[in-house]
Amino acid sequence: QVQLVESGGGLVQAGGSLRLSCAASGSTSVDYNMGWFRQAPGKDREFVAVISWNGGVLYYADSVKGRFAISRASTRNTVYLQMNSLKSEDTAVYYCAAGRVVTVSKDYFDYWGQGTQVTVSS
C-alpha cells in the first residue's frame, strides 16, 4: 500500500503561484505513476497532470497547459505541482494519486491523498 500526503495549498491572488507537494511512502515493490487531480465545489474530480514513474511521460489538462508543471524528486518519493498564473477557476481541492498506468482517468489510480485546498482570489 502507498500512503500519499499533499501539502502546499493555500490562498493566493489571481496571477500568483503555488507549489504543491505530494509525499509518498509505503510499498516500493511497484513503480507508480503519479497524477494530480482537482475537485472544485459542485464539480467532479478532474484530471490535472500525470507523470510516469521514470519521469519520461507527462500529460496536462488543456486548462493548465503552459501554467502548471508536474515533476518528481530524484528519490521519486515526492511529486510536485508547480502552479503559475493561477486563475480563480483553479480553485479546488487538489489530490495526488498513484497508479500503475499513465492515464488521465482517475479510475486507474489506486491510491489517493487527502487533498489540499487551493483558493485563488480575484
Image: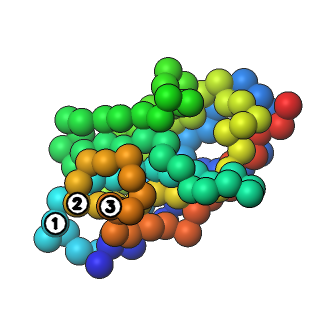
Q: Are marks 2 and 3 in contact (CB under 8 Å)?
A: yes
The residue singled out by tag 2 in the image is 100
The residue shown at (34%, 69%) is 110
Q: Is the C terminus in the top left, top right, bottom left or bottom right quadrant?
A: top right
Question: Of 110 and 9, which appears nearest the observer?
Answer: 110
Q: Residue furthest bottom?
A: 1
Question: Of 61 and 86, which appears nearest the observer?
Answer: 61
Name the amino acid type tagged 2: Arg
Residue 9 is left or right of residue 108, and the answer is right
Question: Of 75 and 51, which appears nearest the observer?
Answer: 51
Marking on residue 108:
3
Residue 83: horizontal and vertical position, in percent? 57, 34
Q: Residue furthest right?
A: 122
Residue 107 is left or right of residue 37, and the answer is left
The residue shown at (83%, 37%) is 121
In which quarter of the view is residue 64 placed? top right
Q: Quick one: label 3 or label 1, which is nearer the N terminus?
A: 1
Is residue 61 visible in the rendered structure shown here?
yes
Q: Residues within 10 Å of mark 1 (few under 14, many from 20)?
A: few
Residue 84 is left or right of residue 101, and the answer is right
Which numbered mark, 2 or 3, is in the foreground of this view?
A: 3
Is residue 16 visible in the rendered structure shown here?
no
